Amino acid sequence: MKKLVALTGAGVSAESGIPTFRDAGGLWEGYDVMEVATPEGWAKNPSLVLEFYNQRRKKALEVQPNQGHKVLAELENDFDVTIITQNVDNLHEKAGSTHVVHLHGSLFESRSSVDEQLVYPINGWELKLGDRCERGTQLRPNIVWFGELVYKMEEAVEYAMQADVFIVVGTSLQVYPAASLIQYTRKDTQRIIVDPKKPDYGIGEDILFVEEGGSTGMEKVKKMLLNQ
């Protein structure tokens, strides 16, 4: 069975109603990124950070996977599929994907402030000030903030190197280190980018561009792959 690896980003979840991470003004859903998505912001005002992620978690619980998520899950019938996602929601899992690597962490996990190996599931939408790990320190969202190491990057590189088919969907390949993953694919890997806009990625000519959004684009990709 061929190995299919899909790198997904905010554009996939946007079709389900989850706002994309950033806008041109450096705000994140009305918040200054530096206040809610950095270790410095957490140290300064943990209550604000917890509230920001509580609201994002609440929103994520209200929305449903779209056709883009569902097609990626359906491809498991014919391929050995790994999803590498920059998204922190659980819509891939909701759609039925069974092997999802969350590069930037998960909204539905908390972790110790002093030991990143101590990770706990979050049931429901709320993580509160006073919720503590087994070592007695405040739990924080298990999210990779700006300035922190993307600790699953090595694992993701391994999957990219093994891919027979590598699909990029819902991401503009501007956020590093995730954007570099396509460069780790083999010369014989079939590379497909699903993007309604076709920018100059500067990563070679042997890439198939599908100029569609995630849902319609992945439908086209699925038909093409199954007809090969």
Image (cartoon, rainbow, N blue to C red):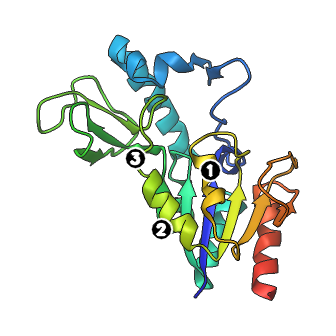
Residue annotated with mark 3: 151
Q: 75 or 123: nearer the eye?
A: 75
Residue shown at 48% from the left, 65% from the top: 158
Q: Which residue type carries mark 1?
A: Ser
Quadrant occupied by the N terminus: bottom right
Classify 201 as above or below 93. above
Nearer-N-terminus badge (1/2): 2
Task: Nearest to the eye among marks 1 and 3: give it.
Answer: 1
Res. 99 mark = 2
Residue annotated with mark 1: 180
Q: Which residue type carries mark 2?
A: His
Residue reaching furthest top?
44
Task: Nearest to the eye among marks 3 and 2: give it.
Answer: 3
Say what secondary structure mark 2 lies in: loop
Say what secondary structure mark 1 lies in: helix
Quadrant occupied by the C terminus: bottom right
Nearer-N-terminus badge (1/3): 3
**How far, Cα to Cα, is label 1 from label 3?**
15 Å
CA neighbours of label 3 inside 10 A, class few (<14), some (14 to 19), many (20+): few
Q: Position of residue 157 (x, y in %)?
A: 51, 59
Q: Position of residue 62 (x, y in %)?
A: 55, 44
**How far, Cα to Cα, is label 1 from label 2?**
21 Å
Q: 183 or 170: nearer the eye?
A: 183
Marks counted in the figure total: 3
Task: Nearest to the eye among marks 1 and 2: give it.
Answer: 1
Say what secondary structure mark 3 lies in: loop
Q: In the picture, residue 191 is in which quadrant? A: bottom right
Q: Position of residue 32 (x, y in %)?
A: 57, 16
User: Seen in the image, is 32 located left or right of residue 152?
Assistant: right
